[in-house]
Amino acid sequence: MSNFTESLPKSTPAAELSSRSVQWPRRVDLFDVMISVTDYSELVRCIINSAKAGESAIVSLFSVHAVISASDDKELLAKVNTFQAIGPDGQPVRWAMNWLHKTNLKERVYGPETTVRLCEAAAEEGVSIYLYGSIPEVLERLETNLKQKFPKLVIAGSESPPFRNLTSHESDALVERVHRSGAGIFFIGLGCPKQDHFAYEYRDRLNCVQVAVGAAFDFHAGTKKTAPAWMQKRGLEWLFRLYEEPRRLWKRYLFTNSNYLFKLVKARIRGVKS
């Protein structure tokens, strides 16, 4: 488990983290994970501009589970803190940023909503996308739904990877396919933390913006239900998902949520004392 600094960390401007032409949002330290102080409009604009400039970049959207996964894993932490942006996906993440750093964020940057807004902007700006993750049936439904919603959207490619690490040959072939496709945005739907490890591994090989969106593929394909708006607004989406998938998620939410609250209180106490 990584140690939180003795005082509330200062925010870090994105310009110090990247020499790229796009000005990415500034970031603040949440349990050693550098989370971007941003909203939908700014993040979508940065991604589109980076894609149009042909620059490689990585953007991920972090829920409580993702924050704790990175905070407690030094290897993962080192990787994700090199990303150009990490959006506050969960309401508790936004609340913590406002509480600890007075960021005054009005809304979270939810992965599924970011996906829709990015596809809309990509369609208007002529930026093609690539879908990577899930299973063939989900991808097929996802493509159909996206094309119906955004007729001008160009889906340059989509594929469901095997449930194992790619071989060297498969990895090279994937990179070649993505390059040939000309995609500017590479959506990754592999789940946390697999998608973040993947994005880091390909950071110097894919000349596009990798955007890790978690379960967004399933939600927009219609294979998983989204929590009601009132639950999302109150930070209770985890409870809805636990109800939907209790066997798979009960341990995650029991230990992750408890760990998150412990870290949050600890950080607040240390910040007040400083």
Image (spheres, helix red, strand yellow):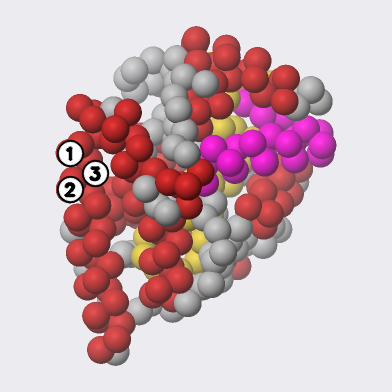
Question: Which of the 4 image quadrants contains residue 128?
Answer: top right
Position of 128 with respect to 172 (left or right) is right
> Residue 255: which disc?
2
Which contiguous range is marked in magenta? 110-130
Q: For the residues marked 2 and 3, what is the alpha-carbon distance in whole angstroms? A: 6 Å
Q: Most extreme residue toward the bottom, as rendered?
A: 274
* Image location of residue 243, percent across then percent down: 29, 32
The residue singled out by tag 1 in the image is 251
Q: Which residue is mark 3?
A: 253
Q: Secondary structure at mark 1?
A: helix
Residue contact between numbered discs 1 and 2, judged by CB atoms under 8 Å: yes
- The main secondary structure of the magenta stretch is helix
Residue at 39 percent of width and 43 percent of height: 237
> As rendered, which of 92 and 192 lies closer to the eye?
92
User: In which image quadrant can residue 19 be found?
Assistant: bottom right
Left/right placement of residue 73 relative to residue 146 reads left
* Circle 1 crowding by C-alpha within 10 Å: few under 14, some 14–19, many from 20: few
The answer to whether marks 2 and 3 mark residues whose Cβ atoms lie closer than 8 Å is yes
Image location (x, y in percent) of residue 17? 53, 64
